[in-house]
Image (cartoon, helix red, strand yellow):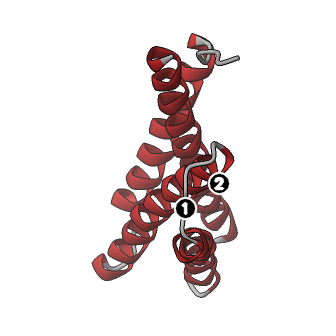
Amino acid sequence: MKQKPSAAFIGASWVGLFAGGVSFCVGLWNATMELNEKGYYFTVLMYGLFSAVSLQKAVRDQLQGIKVTPIYYGIAWFSTGLSILLLIIGLWNSSLIRSEKGFYAMAYLLTLFAAVAVQKNIRDSQDVKES
């Protein structure tokens, strides 16, 4: 039985995505780090978003019996893990104070989680419309 996600969950997912993404980017904008370091963190954020949504799609396709090649499935898992590892390495080696490092880590994880939730909501809503 297919069921559309509740409006509250859809709204919370979008709020989480924007809150995490905007907070991360505003933090970068206001940071006193070099422009190349800001670019690194922004690129890691974009890579993480793409890989997390790609992983969610691959897992969902596989659960629904849609063929997913093992190499794509593996790359999706590897990319998601790598994006998180790259953020950890960047924060570990940065000169930021611990509270700033925690802020970036939490904003990053909130954004990735919310992107997966938004993708899930969109797909669930489309499945309900098609049935």
Q: Amino acid at mark 2?
A: Met
Quadrant (top left/top right/bottom left/bottom right) for the N terminus: top right
- Mark 1 vs mark 2, foreground winner is 1
Residue 90, percent across and down? 55, 81
Q: How packed is label 1: few (under 14 Cα within 10 Å), some, or many (20 or more)?
A: some
Q: How many marks?
A: 2
Residue 118, percent across and down? 51, 35
Q: Please name whichever residue, 17 or 1, is drawn nearer the observer in this view of the structure.
A: 1
Residue 62, percent across and down? 63, 53
Q: Residue at x 47, y 30 (%)?
A: 122
Q: Is residue 103 above or below residue 65?
A: below
Image-quadrant location for residue 64: top right
- Name the residue tied to disc 1: 68
Q: Is residue 21 above or below residue 52?
A: above
| Disc ID at residue 106 | 2
**On the rendered structure, is 42 left or right of 24?**
left
Q: Is residue 69 above or below residue 121?
A: below
Q: Residue at x 56, y 80 (%)?
A: 86
Q: Residue at x 54, y 75 (%)?
A: 75
Q: CA distance from mark 1 to mark 2?
A: 31 Å
Q: Secondary structure at mark 2?
A: helix
Residue 83, percent across and down? 54, 73
Q: Secondary structure at mark 1?
A: loop
* Residue that sits furthest to the left in the current view: 35
* Residue that sits furthest to the top in the current view: 7
